[in-house]
Image (cartoon, helix red, strand yellow):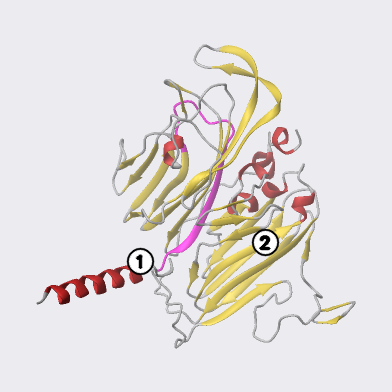
Amino acid sequence: MTIRTFVLSLVALALLQASATAQPPQGDELFDVDNQIVSRSISAENPTGAPGQGGQAASEIGVGRKGAPRFDLKAGQTYLLCDIEGSGTIRHIWMTGTWGRNRDKPMLRDIVIRGYWDGQDHPSIECPIGDFMGSSHAKSTAYQSAVHSTGEKEAFNFWLPMPFTERARFTLTNEGDTDCIVYYQMDYTLNEDHPESVGRLHTNFRRANPTTIKEDFELLPKRTGKGRFIGSMIGVRTLHPGWWGEGEVKVYMDGDDEFPTICGTGSEDYVGLSYGIQNTTYQYHGCSLLERSKEKFEQIELPQNKKVEVPMTYISMYRWHLPDPIYWKKECRVTIQQIGCCYYERDDDWSAASFWYEPVPSEPLGPFPTVKERTADLQPLLNP
């Protein structure tokens, strides 16, 4: 082989590698049009997603001229977002609503999204709409990550693919006392050849207000079988002065007992930051909300056990394990400690919407907090 041929070979190899790494995250060939997949979309203008059935409602300017762009979600009402039959993948959800006009109300924690896969009676997704769409504490901020993108006026986008083999059904329930108007669109594809063992998206919401001293908060309660942990949208409300985030994330998997296989170094370290928390957002990690209440509250300064009056701090942060996957084969449980600097045990208000994939049939998600439990103590942030 001549030097020229060798150099050309290296260049060709480099181009092939660059092309491979430039593929879309889901592995779809952008130029592959020779397949059986069909594209569909559900909205208030076409609630079934059926071909040729969109835009039939009439407005004052005629049929098909923005006749049904939204739906009313009254207090106590459940709305069927979609009921899709076949084998396919929900690719994207966009949603906005009049929760943006009621920023002093915890509507993003009042309203609950539930998702059911392939005929299961219990939901695999059960979460307040705000936390599911990337906003803790019922308050949204404009930012973008690999999973969420949020507009300045509470427009939400969700990007994790959600495969199913027989049926996908989603509902939206208003468990609050304020009526709401909702706009939405669910984009999906059908005629896909998913195996029965494909992982379906699961989402669990938990809140401990407050946490229990020396009892680590569970981001992911124990799951059995096989699966992949995607990550969490985490909310923290401080109940004591001082730094709250020395606690380590621990992933117990496949036989771990007292000690985990994966162990982090601190709460802000887990979301890819350091030396405290900063309001910075990135593709796979970051903090999208860091705000102090204007009002001061009596708190106990630990470990001195001294009463002081200080503001509460609200933090919303996230971590997505997409390029650094966490798989388990038999069982998994993910926790995070509540430790202050330097060092002492503390209790604060923690919440988390956690996302993972596992096959169905799958176990129920466990107890879901009541609307009162989900919305307590948010007013200092929403209506300062």
Q: Give the range drawn in magenta.
A: 198-217
Q: In which quarter of the image is the C terminus?
A: top right
* Amino acid at pointer 1: Thr
Locate residue 262 relative to residue 298 in the image: left or right: left
Q: Which residue is label 1 attached to?
A: 21
**Who is closer to the viewer here, 374 or 263?**
263
Locate residue 269 relative to residue 141 in the image: left or right: left
Relative height, residue 146 to residue 105 (above, below): below
Q: Which residue is drawn at 43% across and 29% down?
A: 246
Relative height, residue 245 to residue 13 (above, below): above
Q: Is residue 90 magenta?
A: no
* Amino acid at pointer 2: Met
Relative height, residue 113 to residue 352 (above, below): below
Residue 230 image offset from top left, x and y in percent: 44, 54
Label 2 crowd (10 A; few <14 / some 14-19 / many >=20): some
Numbered tag placed on residue 95 in the rendering: 2
Q: How far apart are marks 1 and 2 (CA)?
A: 31 Å
- Quadrant of the rendered image containing residue 241: top right
Q: In which quarter of the image is the N terminus?
A: bottom left
Q: Does residue 213 appear in this view?
A: yes
Of callouts 1 and 2, which one flags the residue occurring earlier in the amino acid sequence? 1
